Amino acid sequence: MTAPTWERWVVAIDGPGGVGKSTVARGVAQALGYESLDSGAFYRAATLLIKLHRIDPEDEAAVMVTLAGADLAYRDGTIFLEGVDVGRAIRTVAITTATSPLAALPGVRLLVVKRLRRWVAEREGRVVVEGRDMGTVVFPASELKIYLDADPEIRAARRAGETRATVREVAARLKNRDRQDSTRTLSPLAAADDAHRIDTTTLNADQVIARVLSFRAG
Ligand code: DC
C-alpha cells in the first residue's frame, strides 16, 4: 500500500524512556509551526481506563470492548478521557508500570495506531510525533526520523528529577520497561534504518532540538 502524501511531512522521534522525547518534540514542533503528539499518552490513557473499569489486563477481549468505545482525545498537548484531562493521572508509577504490558497487546496497538494516524492525517502531517515505533511502523514514509538515546544512568537521573523517587529506583524501573518495550514481538522499540541517531547524554534540550532541525534543513 502506498503511503498518503502527508505522511512524508511527519517528523518521527523515537527512543527509550527518560531520553527527552517530549521536550524535544515540543521544541521542534514550535520551531516548525507544527503540533506535537505524544503517542505514549494514548497507551497510558488506555491503561488508566482499563484500571478504572477494573478490567483484567490479561483478558484481551474485555480490554478491547472497553477501549473500542472509549472517548480519547488529544489536544493542547494533553490527553482527555471522557472529556476529562488525565495528563497528570497517567504519569503515576502504577500506570507507567502497567502500560508497557498493555501496549504489547496486538489489539491495543491496532486501535491506538488508527487513532494516531487519524489525528496526524487531520493535520496533513504537520506534526512531530514521538514514541517507540513512529519511524518504524506508524509513519514509515516520514522523511525525517530521529532516534534519541542516552546513557541509562543519565536517563534515570533526568526522570528522578521529575519525581520524588531515588535515581536507583527509577533506574531499575526504566531498565525493566526498556526490556519489555524492546523485546516485545509487535512494534518493539527500535531505530528505523533511515533514522538519524542522536546521543543526548551530554546535550541539553536546546542542543538536541537544534540538531534535529539541522537534519531537516540539510
Ligand atoms: O513514552 P512513554 O513513557 O509515555 O510511554 C509509555 C509506554 O507506552 C511505554 O512503556 C511503551 C508504550 N508505548 C508504545 O508501546 N509505543 C509508543 N509509540 C509509545 C509508547
Image (tube, helix red, strand yellow):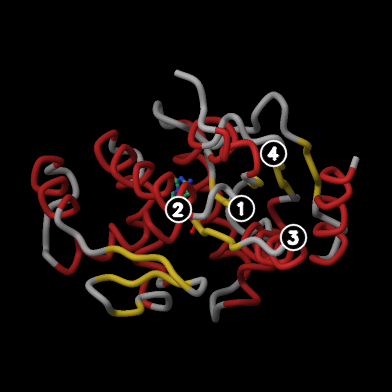
Specify which label sits upstream in the sequence, 3 or 2: 3
Q: Find the distance from the CA under tag 2 to the CA under tag 4.
A: 20 Å
Q: Amino acid at mark 2?
A: Glu
Disc 1 secondary structure class: loop
Mark number for residue 126? 1
Residue at left 33%, top 56%? 98
Nearer to us of marks 2 and 4 is: 2
Q: Which mark is residue 145?
A: 4
Image coordinates of residue 64 in percent, x first then y, are 16, 45
Counting from the top left corner in percent of width and height, residue 151 is at 75, 50
Per the image, the residue denoted by label 2 is: 122
Mark 2 lies on a secondary structure that is helix
Which numbered disc flags the more N-terminal residue, 1 or 4?
Answer: 1
Which of the pair 169/93 is nearer the observer? 93
Q: Position of residue 36 (x, y in %)?
A: 58, 61
Q: Indicate which disc, 3 or 1, sits on the residue closer to the N terminus.
A: 3
The type of residue carrying mark 4 is: Lys
Quadrant of the frame with the C terminus: top right
Identify whether 47 is placed above or below 101. below
Real-space Cα distance between discs 4 and 3?
15 Å
Q: Amino acid at mark 3?
A: Leu
User: Which amino acid, mark 1?
Assistant: Arg
